[in-house]
């Protein structure tokens, strides 16, 4: 995939309407109060928005939020599949579920951060959105309703994509800045590029520069740290990184499948029995490619999955029945921290253990601390790894923290991302 894409700085937006796809899928308070509990994604969009407004563009921002069900029939079907009683499934409940995913709180917070009014449409491409887009002046910003209120959004419906593009007019521009959604071919992430010239915002530009650069032309040695629960979710990533990395470090729950594959005992640890052959293939491929593949040498085990569990350290592959691995051990911590010391580039995706439990966060914390002290380019691949470095207080010491968990994983797998492929090449 070509990572060298045109950005907002490569097009003239003065006096034009810009359809801007953001990622405003923010977490909301569960009590239905409409309070945003973390506005990080809104703040991440500000540099692109501010640039467009300063350049004299009229900005039509859009985003999805959550997973609304666009029609009552679909809602009813999903509730029945969940085992709900048919009599309890009402249109009123469906409408309430939609109301909780409206964009009013986002428009309010965005306005506060920009220090100016954000005009909010009552629909996505309906009469209100059309009227407000037509009246929008340079330097003004409006926000469409949740794009997933339209059932054609996730199906990449060309009619919906054209209707969204039409809001920006004949000389409009499409700017993609929602990295967390670029791995999906939806109407608002890819479809609109068929009707408007499409470029990236600063957020996507940064992701392409850092992750794309690390894969295409890394400062070496390139060390990849892969953790998390399952080998199956990282198959493509490991396979692709074996082509470019100098060292691959394996931690987290997935390491127990590797241990079992090598003839070890893993007790009650996370295990994917179907993937044992795959693990041995990866070990063989690493040898063939001359890539150093580091696996844990010791493990912190627990007698139950709980923050107050009894724990002890055992050699890797020697976990007794009734016990489960919840973190890498002290010797492994030393091995892994030494491996990143002289790295040129480090990509990290997935924690080393159950970092949510303080007792079993030692390995993840040690790796984060080691990365904070290295002079390497450090790239955190979104999701749990991003949450871990934030929670442990090392976020400001990392070169780049990806804004998209699923998208960054697919990026590292070498997959084509529809929302990036559709942008104009430089």
Image: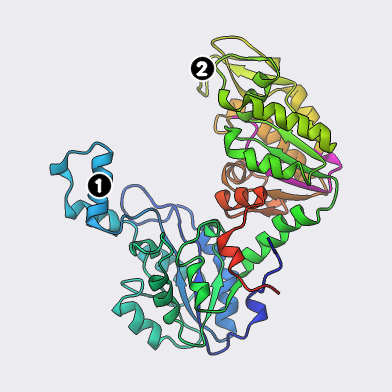
Q: Nearer the viewer, mark 2 or mark 1?
A: 1
Name the foreground residue: 89 vs 23.
Answer: 89
What is the C-alpha distance between the residues marked 2 and 1? Answer: 38 Å
For the magenta stretch, what is the residue range? 340-353
Q: Residues within 10 Å of mark 2 (few under 14, many from 20)?
A: some
Question: Which residue of the protein is positioned furthest toward the top in this rendering?
Answer: 321
Question: Which residue of the protein is positioned furthest toward the left in this rendering?
Answer: 87
Q: Which mark is residue 77?
A: 1
Labels in figure, total: 2
Name the spot of residue 112 as percent of width and height, x first. 46, 69
**Residue where numbered disc 2 is placed:** 304
Q: Is residue 20 above or below residue 171?
A: above
- Describe residue 331's horizontal placement relative to residue 415 as left or right: right
- Describe residue 338's horizontal placement relative to residue 237 as left or right: right
Q: Residues within 10 Å of mark 1 (few under 14, many from 20)?
A: few
Quadrant placement of the N terminus: bottom right
Name the spot of residue 200 as percent of width and height, x first. 61, 70
Q: Is residue 373 above or below residue 144?
A: above
Residue that appears at 18% across and 54% down: 92
Name the foreground residue: 50 vs 232.
Answer: 232
Could you say whether the residue bearing mark 1 is in a helix, strand or loop? helix
């Amino acid at each position: 995939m070509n990572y060298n894409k045109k950005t907002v700085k490569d097009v003239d937006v003065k006096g034009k309407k810009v359809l801007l796809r953001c990622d405003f899928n923010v977490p909301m308070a569960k009590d239905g109060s409409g309070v945003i509990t973390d506005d990080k994604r809104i703040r991440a969009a500000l540099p692109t928005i501010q640039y467009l407004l300063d350049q004299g563009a009229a900005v039509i921002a859009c985003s999805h939020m959550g997973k609304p069900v666009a029609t009552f029939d679909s809602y009813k079907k999903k509730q029945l599949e969940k085992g709900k009683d048919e009599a309890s499934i009402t249109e009123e409940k469906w409408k309430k579920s939609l109301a909780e995913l409206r964009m009013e709180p986002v428009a309010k917070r965005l306005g506060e951060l920009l220090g100016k009014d954000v005009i909010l449409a009552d629909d996505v491409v309906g009469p209100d959105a059309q009227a407000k887009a037509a009246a929008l002046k340079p330097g003004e910003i409006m926000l469409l309703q949740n794009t997933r209120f339209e059932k054609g959004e996730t199906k990449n419906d060309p009619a919906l994509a054209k209707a969204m593009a039409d809001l920006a007019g004949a000389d409009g521009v499409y700017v993609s800045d929602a990295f967390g959604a670029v791995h999906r071919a939806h109407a608002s992430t890819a479809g609109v590029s068929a009707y408007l010239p499409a470029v990236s915002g600063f957020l996507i530009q940064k992701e392409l520069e850092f992750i794309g650069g690390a894969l295409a032309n890394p400062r070496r040695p390139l060390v990849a740290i892969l953790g998390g629960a399952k080998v199956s979710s990282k198959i493509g990533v490991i396979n692709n990184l074996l082509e470019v990395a100098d060292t691959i470090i394996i931690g987290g729950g997935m390491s127990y499948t590797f241990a079992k594959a090598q003839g070890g005992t893993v007790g009650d640890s996370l295990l994917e029995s179907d993937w044992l052959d795959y693990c041995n293939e990866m070990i063989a491929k690493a040898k063939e490619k001359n890539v150093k593949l580091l696996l844990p040498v010791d493990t912190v085990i627990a007698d139950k999955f709980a923050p107050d569990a009894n724990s002890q350290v055992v050699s890797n592959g020697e976990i007794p029945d009734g016990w489960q691995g919840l973190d890498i051990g002290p010797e492994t911590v030393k091995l892994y921290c030494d491996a990143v010391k002289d790295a040129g580039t480090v990509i990290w995706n997935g924690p080393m253990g159950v970092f949510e439990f303080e007792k079993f966060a030692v390995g993840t914390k040690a790796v984060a601390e080691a990365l904070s002290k290295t002079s390497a380019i450090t790239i955190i691949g979104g999701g749990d790894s991003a949450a871990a470095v934030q929670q442990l207080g090392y976020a400001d010491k990392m070169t780049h923290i990806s804004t998209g968990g699923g998208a960054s994983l697919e990026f590292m797998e070498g997959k084509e991302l529809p929302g990036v492929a559709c942008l104009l090449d430089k």
